[in-house]
Image (cartoon, grey):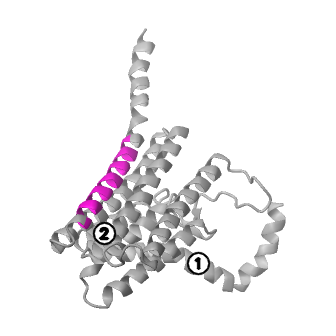
């Protein structure tokens, strides 16, 4: 009887632990929802009150930043509490499509495309097309990640093996984070930047959308940071995170933009260095033999 009484509370606690990662995922979806709402409100007030519109766009960008935090925590909490489930993986991916797919394209469209390019023009249509392609590339990236996570073995000859230390292709949260950090840095609508500048900046935004979409469906590897703070150097990692948190708190406009640019670009730089490295070219045939 004593054994049964002591086991019952633990079973209930174990069941309750499964709700914690789901709560972070729900918060992730909530931030994506708020991003869309604030983007709509910002677009509605551009003509009458651009300053108020900028505040709405800033709130939407910050919502994406908080969503990245929640998205990072739900996976780590699930691994720490050993409460990862198959439905949790699928729910997390659906949440990412909403928050980091639909949310950013609504924000970018309201902030930098619709106010700059008139409807039914070639540039406006190109912007809508690139936004759609960004969303499709992000959805494909998430589908590929789920497939690799559930089937870690090589499915066909030549397909990429799973490496827990890195992601294959740019993950959609950092892609959305980079766009959000740009808008957080300069939340005023692009149409308010004077003659000539709005169109120029709008074209740069379109180029960025195309580049991010291509990076998401590419095979370029990006650091996952899943092994961070798992060794004896935990104290140094904690101190680094604390210092980074303070830097973001006081200089969020600069810190978030720098972090976004560094993460998105580091995979491309490593890829280019790998191509130019003669050592890697010599090791590639050996790796192919070992994998076969």
- Expressed as whole percent of the image width and height from the top left, the position of residue 204 reads 42, 82
Which one is in front, 186 or 13? 186
Residue drawn at (37%, 61%) of the image = 238
- Expressed as whole percent of the image width and height from the top left, the position of residue 31 reads 32, 53
Q: Residues within 10 Å of mark 2 (few under 14, many from 20)?
A: few
**Which residue has dot 1 on it?**
270
Which of pointers 1 and 2 lies earlier in the amino acid sequence? 2
Say which element carries label 1.
Answer: helix
Real-space Cα separation, disc 1 to disc 2, in angstroms:
26 Å
Find out whether residue 29 is within the magenta segment: yes
- Expressed as whole percent of the image width and height from the top left, the position of residue 248 reads 28, 69
Relative side of 22 to 224, left or right: left
Q: Which quadrant holds the N terminus?
A: top left
From the viewer's perspective, is residue 231 above or below residue 22? below
Which one is in front, 77 or 147? 147
Residue drawn at (49%, 41%) of the image = 88
Question: What is the magenta range?
Answer: 23-43
**The image quarter in which residue 110 lies:** bottom left
Residue 243 marker? 2
Relative side of 277 to 72, left or right: right
Label the magenta part by its dominant secondary structure.
helix
Say which element carries label 2.
Answer: helix
């Amino acid at each position: 009887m004593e054994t049964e009484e002591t086991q019952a509370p633990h079973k209930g606690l174990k069941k309750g632990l499964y709700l914690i990662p789901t709560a972070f995922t729900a918060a992730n979806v909530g931030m994506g929802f708020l991003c869309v709402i604030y983007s709509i409100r910002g677009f509605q007030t551009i003509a009458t009150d651009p300053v108020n519109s900028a505040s709405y766009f800033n709130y939407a960008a910050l919502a994406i930043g908080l969503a990245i935090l929640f998205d990072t925590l739900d996976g780590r909490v699930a691994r720490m509490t050993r409460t990862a489930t198959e439905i949790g993986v699928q729910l997390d991916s659906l949440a990412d499509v909403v928050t980091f797919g639909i949310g950013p394209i609504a924000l970018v469209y309201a902030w930098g495309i619709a106010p700059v390019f008139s409807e039914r023009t070639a540039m406006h249509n190109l912007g809508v097309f690139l936004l759609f392609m960004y969303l499709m590339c992000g959805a494909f990236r998430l589908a590929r990640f789920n497939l690799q996570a559930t089937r870690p073995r090589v499915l066909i000859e030549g397909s990429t093996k799973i490496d827990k230390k890195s992601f294959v292709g740019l993950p959609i949260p950092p892609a959305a984070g980079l766009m959000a950090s740009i808008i957080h840095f300069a939340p005023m609508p692009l149409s308010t930047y004077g003659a000539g500048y709005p169109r120029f900046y709008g074209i740069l935004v379109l180029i960025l959308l195309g580049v991010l979409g291509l990076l998401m469906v590419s095979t370029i590897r990006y650091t996952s940071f899943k092994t961070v703070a798992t060794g004896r150097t935990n104290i140094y990692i904690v101190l680094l995170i604390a210092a980074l948190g303070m830097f973001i708190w006081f200089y969020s406009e600069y810190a978030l933009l720098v972090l976004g640019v560094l993460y998105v670009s580091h995979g491309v730089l490593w890829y280019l260095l790998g191509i130019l490295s003669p050592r890697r070219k010599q090791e590639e045939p050996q790796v192919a033999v070992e994998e076969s």
